[in-house]
Image (cartoon, helix red, strand yellow):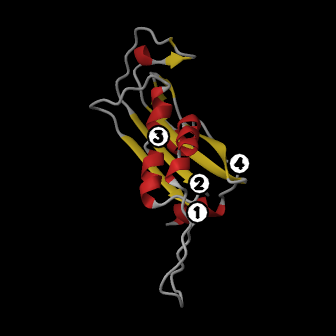
Amino acid sequence: QEHVFAAIENARADFEEGDVGAGKGMVCHGLKGGIGSASRIVELDGARYTLGVLALAKHGRLEDLCIGGKRVGAQIAAHMESFIVVMATDLPLCARQLERVVKRASVGLARLCIYICYFSGEVFLGFSTTNRVPHESARAVLPCTVLHEGRIDAVFRAMGEAT
């Protein structure tokens, strides 16, 4: 409990990344891994929305590592894989859309030539801060804003790029 409250108290926009906290001991493609973040801005109907990704990486075999589309991994094989991605956004997404967007984290992993395998442990989570449901309300029916399905491709792209 004390660690949770300490983490909440120390939360800020700029935070440590790399070989810290949950990033300690992470290995990626047989090399040092860690924790990192990225975000993208998605513009829809003149409004700007932010999609942010926090990734904790421990994945890949060195021989599968690609940088700039070229295989640069050589002979060493470290075959323990896992990847945790948390996506937060202010985009108005329903639960089904959140699930669809979060699955696009695999697009970002594929760009690194990460192959999900038997030993993999990928975990993708996502949430939106747009539609807040009050604990108590005088209203029985509450308003909800949601993205039109025909406009979701830009969000898919943002998720893949941020991951």
Q: Nearer the viewer, residue 27 or 109?
A: 109
On the image, which quarter does residue 37 sit in?
top right
Disc 2 or 1, which lies upstream in sequence?
2
Position above or below: 101 against 94: above
Q: Amino acid at mark 3?
A: Arg
Q: Secondary structure at mark 2?
A: strand
| Horizontal arrangement in the rendering, residue 98 relative to residue 9 (left or right) | left
Q: Viewer-nearest of labels 3 and 4? A: 3
| Horizontal arrangement in the rendering, residue 13 relative to residue 29 (left or right) | right
Q: Amino acid at mark 1?
A: Thr
Per the model, the C-alpha gap separating discs 2 and 3 is 14 Å
Position above or below: 71 against 158: above
- As drawn, the label of residue 89 is 2
Disc 2 or 3, which lies upstream in sequence?
2
Name of the residue lying farthest toward the left? 118
Name of the residue lying farthest toward the top? 75
Position above or below: 156 against 149: above
Give how far across and how far down residue 140 sits, in percent.
47, 86
Per the model, the C-alpha gap separating discs 4 and 2 is 17 Å
